[in-house]
Amino acid sequence: MGNCHTVGPNEALVVSGGCCGSDQKTYIVGGWAWAWWLISDIQRMSLEVMTILCRCENIETSEGVPLDVTGVAQVKVMTENELLGYACEQFLGKSVVEIKSVILQTLEGHLRAILGTLTVEQIYQDRDKFAILVREVAAPDVGRMGIEILSFTIKDVYDKVQYLSSLGKTQTAAVQRDADIGVAEAERDAGIREAECKKEMMDVKFLADTKMADSKRELEMQKASFNQEVNTKKAEAQLAYELQAAKEQQKIRLEEIEIEVVQRKKQITIEEKEIDRTDKELIATVKRPAEAEAYKMQQLAEGQKIKKVLMAQAEAEKIRCLGEAEAGSIEVVGKAEAEKMRLKAEAYLQYGEAAKTALVLEALPKIAGKVAAPLAKTNEIVILSGDGSRVTGEVNRLLAELPVSINALTGVDLTKIPLLQKMTGQNSQTAI
């Protein structure tokens, strides 16, 4: 019988021995293995990193200057089967302290050998190169032990003869000088660079402001474009909604119109029937009596018309007879007047101017009557004159102007009548 043994990734399990005197060895890292009782041996080896502090004192360099050097190495056992076998052959059964001691002796030996080939300046100024050189030289030797050098660094380098400090003073002075020069040049370069940086800053600021303005403008334009699209979509949606609402309203209105048409048709049918009934009722109650009354009135009008025609015919006959009688009498009177005028004309022709004068004299009273007609309504005429003979003169003047007026009206010169000449002459003498 036997047991099952397990190991973590930071340890190596070594199983040796077996049946029939077998010399086979099994190396297990982070796994398990079976071991027989009495005939198998189980041993463990740590695979963790080991830190080794190497210190070499009074080691002379190539220039004979004694130095004290301290280095730190990080080493571990390698896990490849062959190299792990080498490590097990060398260190299996030993403690970590014993393993460190063996590796330390090897590293110190190589460190001393390398220090003897270098100068102080090379060791002090290029520690990394020195450490790499030590690791490269020591790696083959420790590798044959199954040990891997993960890192090696120089921790301290110092001496007891003040060589490093003297070297440091000269270097410090040179460094201080170079530092002052460097400071001045740095300040100069800093001023120049500061001005350049300010200029670049202003350029960058202006460029940034320009870009910000452009970005803001593009943002505003984009917002305006988005708002326009949104408003367009809203308007389209609103118009679509209103259009759909209008269509629905139109459908509803068409339905209402169809209902109204049906109702109107029914109402028209009812009204037509009512009209037929009313027509029949009117025919029975109004038309027929009206037609009878109209026929009666027509017959009465015909009779009245015939009566008036007959009366008009009789009246016309009467007027005609009266007209004929009157015309006969007028004819007789006209003939008599014509004969009278003829006789007057013959007499006027015979008497000449005397006849005309007679006619004028006959007409004078009528003319005087017409002229004096307005004065007939006058109660009293008052003539204002301071001289009594002046009134008489005015009357005589009026009488003297009368023949002239009559001559103008009738063409008859009254001044040629002897009697009037005599009267006019007397009046003239009286006036004188």
Image (spheres, grey):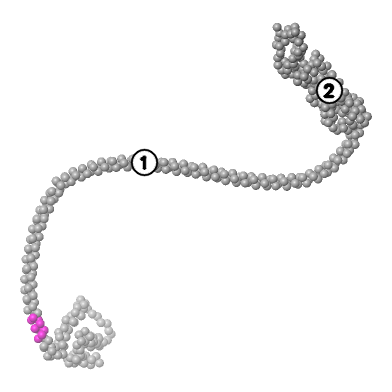
Q: Was residue 102 drawn as part of the magenta stretch in this picture?
A: no
In the rendered image, which residue does mark 2 sit on? Answer: 141
Q: Quadrant of residue 127?
A: top right
Q: Nearer the viewer, residue 83 or 426?
A: 83
Labelled pair 2, 1 in contact (Cβ < 8 Å): no
Q: Main secondary structure of the magenta part?
A: helix
Whether residue 48 can be seen here:
no
Q: Nearer the viewer, residue 379 or 145?
A: 145
For residue 331, the mark is none
Which amino acid, by three-letter code, is at mark 1?
Lys
- The quarter of the picture where the N terminus appears is top right
Q: In the displayed structure, does residue 252 sit left or right of residue 345? A: right
- The quarter of the picture where the C terminus appears is bottom left
Above-or-below relation of 352 to 74: below
Q: Quadrant of residue 4?
A: top right
Magenta-drawn segment = 335-343
Whether residue 283 can be seen here:
yes
Above-or-below relation of 326 to 255: below
Crowd tier of the residue under label 1, counting other residues whose Cα lies within 10 Å: few below 14, some 14–19, many 20 or above: few
Q: Quadrant of residue 41?
A: top right
The residue sitting at 19% across, 91% down in the picture is 416
Q: In the displayed structure, does residue 432 sit left or right of residue 307? A: right
Above-or-below relation of 252 to 92: below
In the rendered image, which residue does mark 1 sit on? Answer: 251
Residue with the most extreme front position: 20
Above-or-below relation of 324 to 1: below
The residue sitting at 13% across, 89% down in the picture is 349
- Marks 2 and 1, how far apart in space? 106 Å
The spot of residue 100 in percent (x, y) is: 82, 19
Which amino acid, by three-letter code, is at mark 2?
Asp
